[in-house]
Image (tube, rainbow, N blue to C red):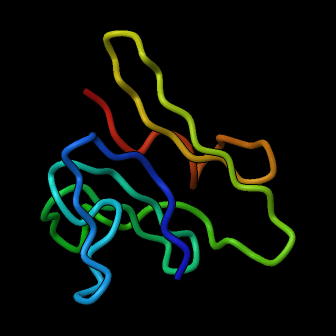
Amino acid sequence: ICQVGWATPDFAPDFRSGEGVGDCDKSWGFDGIRQLKWHSPMDEDESKFGSEWKTGDVIGISVDLSESGAMACSVNGSFDALNGTAFTG
């Protein structure tokens, strides 16, 4: 498991229960090992995202601070499908 992402100052992880970035409405997360994304409760179809991360890959995450608020993930510098924008607004 390799979850990366963003959180608001109100985010409170719970390492005992396994709650981390993306598991509540105060954070957004990606996991390229499991090819999933999270933000609050999402159904299984909504959470599928991205290409599989492998040893040696360079993972990038970005957020557009303009009105779109788009959050995206890149692998080895590419935001092309299956990666790219995961969350907006």
Vertical relation: 58 (above or below) 77: below
Split into 4 quadrants, where in the image is the C terminus? Answer: top left
| Rendered residue at 16%/64% (across/down) | 42
Q: Position of residue 2 (x, y in %)?
A: 55, 74
The quadrant holding residue 17 is bottom left
The residue closer to the viewer here, 21 or 86, is 21
How many discs appear?
A: 0
The quadrant in which residue 15 appears is bottom left
Along the horizontal axis of the image, is 88 left or right of 3? Answer: left
In the image, what residue occupies the spot 37% across and 67% down?
48
Q: Residue furthest bottom?
A: 16
Residue 60 position within the rendered picture, expressed as x and y whole percent measured from the top left: 67, 46
Q: Is residue 37 above or below residue 67?
A: below
Relative to residue 69, is residue 42 depicted above or below? below
- In the picture as drawn, the residue positioned furthest to the right comes out as 56
Q: Residue at x 12, y 64 (%)?
A: 41
In which quadrant of the rendered view does residue 56 lie? bottom right
| Closer-to-camera residue (12/22) | 12
Residue 78 shown left or right of residue 74 in the figure = right
Coordinates of residue 87 in the picture (x, y in percent): 34, 40
Asked if residue 34 is positioned above or below residue 59 in the image, the reply reads below
- Residue at 31 percent across and 32 percent down: it is 88
